[in-house]
Image: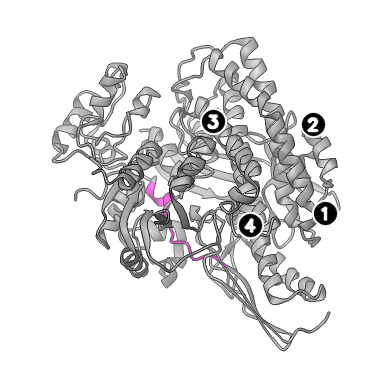
Amino acid sequence: MKTTASVNIDVHHLTRVEGHGNIRVNMTNGVVERCEWQVPEAPRFFEAMVRGRHYSEVARITSRICGICSIGHTLASVKATEAALGIEVTEQTKKLRRLLKHAENFDSHVLHVYVLVAPDLLGAPSVFPLVETHGEVVACALRLKRLAHEWGSMIGGRTTHPTTVVPGGFTKLPTVAEVTVMRDRLLEAVPDLAATLATVRALAPNIPAFKRPTEYMAVTSDEEYGLYDGYIQTILPDGDRARYEVADYRSCTNEYVVPQSTAKFTRNRLNSYAAGALARFNVNYDRLHPEAKEVAGSLGISPICTNPYMNSVAQVVEIVHSAYESLHLMDELIADGIADEPLVAPTKAGTGASAVEVPRGILFHEYTYGEDGFCTGADCIIPTGQNHANIQADFTALLPWLIGAGKNENEMRLAFEMLVRAYDPCISCSTHYLDVEFVR
Amino acid sequence: MGKPKIAFFDFTSCEGCQIEFTNYGDEATLELLKHVELVEFREAMTETTDGPIDIALVEGSFTRDADRDRLLEIRRRARYVIAYGACACTGGVNALKNHQDDFSEYVYGDDSVMPHLESGTARPISAAIEVDYEVRGCPMSKDELLLVISNLLHGTEHVVPSHPVCVECKRRETICRYDEGDHCMGQVARAGCGAPCPADGIPCEACRGFVDEPNIRALEKVLMERAGFSQKRAVGKSRMFTANLRS
């Protein structure tokens, strides 16, 4: 490794991420004094706040953990409540929820890839100057964003804190006519998807070639790509897999406190693991839609990909997967019709856990309810919380890699910022506060 | 004259109201950008400014003393401050913990004594600075935000509705939640959203706060007598998004 005299990077409140995060790297005469990822977000205490709340209110409160992933939080919350209360929802409910989950993934990934990541690869500070220089790319992004918002709203009532998704089913169902209109609009968006792929393909050479093998964790289903439901599966870089039941999620998340810091980290078989699109891609590649697999090939990503920057490329693969899977789900709904179904009532009281994939990775909710239907305890483990230890481990490996590549301080700062952005962190959740402090 | 400068700022929140802003899609975003200049929006852009701002849009509630200086600085630079979203306008769901004294111990256990976990009362930003306009709701109504900005650009005074949500349900001919065997808080909830929740089959939870001088005792009585709630549930329900608006 080359020795660089000094590096001093201090990014206060990193931009183009949700929530607040800081990057601090100090090196003097080749000696690393500090290389850390900090999260100064104000804690919000959702797990405490839902205590004493009726089960009908809990998902409406916990959806407010996150504005971007609020569909996923709502689904995780109602699924955990249903598990606790012995509610088995209908196949139609599951199908509509899967379609809603795809809308969220598509929506969030479009926003992340185009608005938050693309400016780095195009050398722009944000998407707004691109309106002048890359007008059609921006217009395409906004069209896809609006489509996803209206597709999610058709099922969830709205996409920020959905209204219709409640324990036991839906309070309002879309009509077959609405689904048909949305199916046609999604089909019409295929040229926009092709334009997205062309944009990403052109920008792909600007993605750093950094690699750091780690463990990858995702929801897996024997039938499908496992966004809405399934069990927990992890894969190591050598392909070794492990399976865990959702109810035992604590046995693979293992929250712990780092001795020299106040941070709660998670770990499983290695000292950190990754969640998110790249983790899902690595764990569930075989169950991707054939169109998505083809896109993956054309974008040069294959499992097991150990470059964390490629998370954004995995998101593009998932955009295509969600589009084609949703066309299939919409076709089924149009063919079968949508029946007016009453909400399924509770059959018991107790504790229940759930796992759902949100755009940023695997999300766990768990609640306990008393016989009166009021919540007595809650636990939520968010994807970004699970990724913090992995981001920190990437930081530790990235600094010598950048020095070895002869990067200057500005290039290093951008590389660190891009790394964090690639994870698409969603720090505003702050159900579990983290303050990463590594001092060497 | 250049375009008015608009900046977004966020405090304790889920940032869902900023996401609502992105939900305009191609329909309104490109049109809006013809009329205003975005100068700061941390969630979507790297550019920042320390110069004067015409309209500062502030999301999130005020929960730490450390946030006060940032808010004062925003006020100093901005001609108009718009609080948008329930967290900024009333404290939102963040205020649910204001009625608990063990929230930190419950979430952090033995670590809860650490100083960086300090979290004070969740308050609206008007507890720290003067606010010119409020766009309420969880999430805020994006159409209402466009209307407020449009009114400001045209020099028209924005009128904030103070009638209850029930009026808007009647206008769109939504069957009353009580007639469906459910409960609702629309009688005392401030309108302006267009009453989407009852139309989607769920009760109004007053995410926009209450009308002026709401009769809370009557609300609790209705929740007990017509929805069959226990007193505990009626009181808890009536605090869902409005924990800050009374003792």
Q: What are the residue bounds of the magenta stretch?
A: A38-49
Disc assigned to residue A421: 4
Q: Which residue is identified by label 1?
A: A237
Residue A353 drawn at (x, y percent) = 55, 40
Cβ–Cβ under 8 Å for marks 4 and 3: no
Q: Amino acid at mark 1?
A: Pro
One can see residue B72 in this view = yes
Q: Are marks 4 and 3 on the same chain?
A: yes
* Residue B201 relative to residue A289: left or right: left
Residue A116 drawn at (x, y percent) = 61, 52
Q: Which residue is identified by label 3?
A: A152
Q: Amino acid at mark 2?
A: Glu
Q: Residues within 10 Å of mark 2 (few under 14, many from 20)?
A: some
Is A17 inside the magenta-drawn segment? no
Q: Secondary structure at mark 1?
A: loop
Q: Secondary structure at mark 4?
A: helix
Q: Earlier in the sequence, mark 1 or mark 3?
A: 3
**Which of these two is toward me, B234 or A195?**
A195
Cβ–Cβ under 8 Å for marks 4 and 2: no
Q: Secondary structure at mark 2?
A: helix
Above/below status of A159 relative to A155 = below
Q: Which residue is identified by label 2?
A: A291
Disc assigned to residue A43: none
Q: Earlier in the sequence, mark 4 or mark 3?
A: 3
Residue at image position (51%, 25%) is A154
Q: Chain of mark 4?
A: A
Residue at image position (72%, 89%) is A29
Residue at image position (62%, 24%) is A185
Q: Amino acid at mark 4?
A: Arg
Of tags 1 and 2, the one toward the viewer is: 2
Q: Earlier in the sequence, mark 1 or mark 2?
A: 1
